[in-house]
Amino acid sequence: MGEIKKGNSVKKTKSGNREEAENLRVRAMLMMEIDKYIQREGISQAEAAKRLGVTQPRISGVVRGKIELFSVDTLIAMLAQAGLNVKIQITKTKSPKRRRRLGIAK
């Protein structure tokens, strides 16, 4: 499994797969937004589970950073249940590396 570095930098995964690293980065960002939502609302994991349409253990997985348990689709669905829109912006950089930006509309 790969690693995510603060500042949204993508590190290579153990396999060296850039696509996997990018997927991990996107999932980490989505998970952080869910965690921010829970903190901002001041709600329990049980209440968050009700609002996001999942079980409390799933919320626990998000809060604990268990990235391997979640797909991008699942995380986007959870954010949508919270009334948050996900906007994805893909830009081309001058270098051969591609840079993708992800933001949550509030």
Image (tube, rainbow, N blue to C red):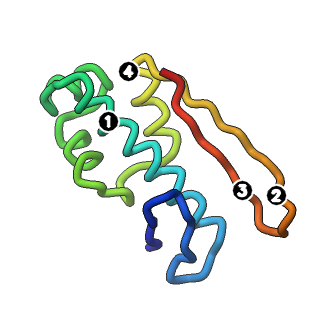
Q: Which residue is mark 1?
A: 36
Type of residue at label 2? Thr
Task: Say which of marks 1 and 4 sits in front.
Answer: 1
Q: Real-space Cα distance between discs 4 and 3?
A: 27 Å
Q: Real-space Cα distance between discs 4 and 2?
A: 33 Å
Q: Real-space Cα distance between discs 1 and 2?
A: 29 Å
Q: Secondary structure at mark 1?
A: helix
Where 39 sits versus 91, above or below? Answer: above
Give yes or no for contact between labels 1 and 2 (Cβ–Cβ under 8 Å): no
Q: Which residue is mark 2?
A: 93
Q: Secondary structure at mark 4?
A: loop
Q: Pick whichever of labels 2 and 3 is earlier in the sequence.
A: 2
Where 6 sits versus 106, above or below? Answer: below
Q: Which residue is mark 4?
A: 82
Q: Nearer the viewer, residue 91 or 86?
A: 91
Q: Real-space Cα distance between discs 1 and 4?
A: 12 Å
Q: Which residue is mark 3?
A: 99
Type of residue at label 3? Arg
Which residue corresponds to the image point at 45% horizontal and 65% vertical from the top-left? 4
Which residue corresponds to the image point at 37% horizontal and 44% vertical from the top-left? 32
Which residue corresponds to the image point at 62% horizontal and 31% vertical from the top-left? 87
Q: Residues within 10 Å of mark 4 (few under 14, many from 20)?
A: some
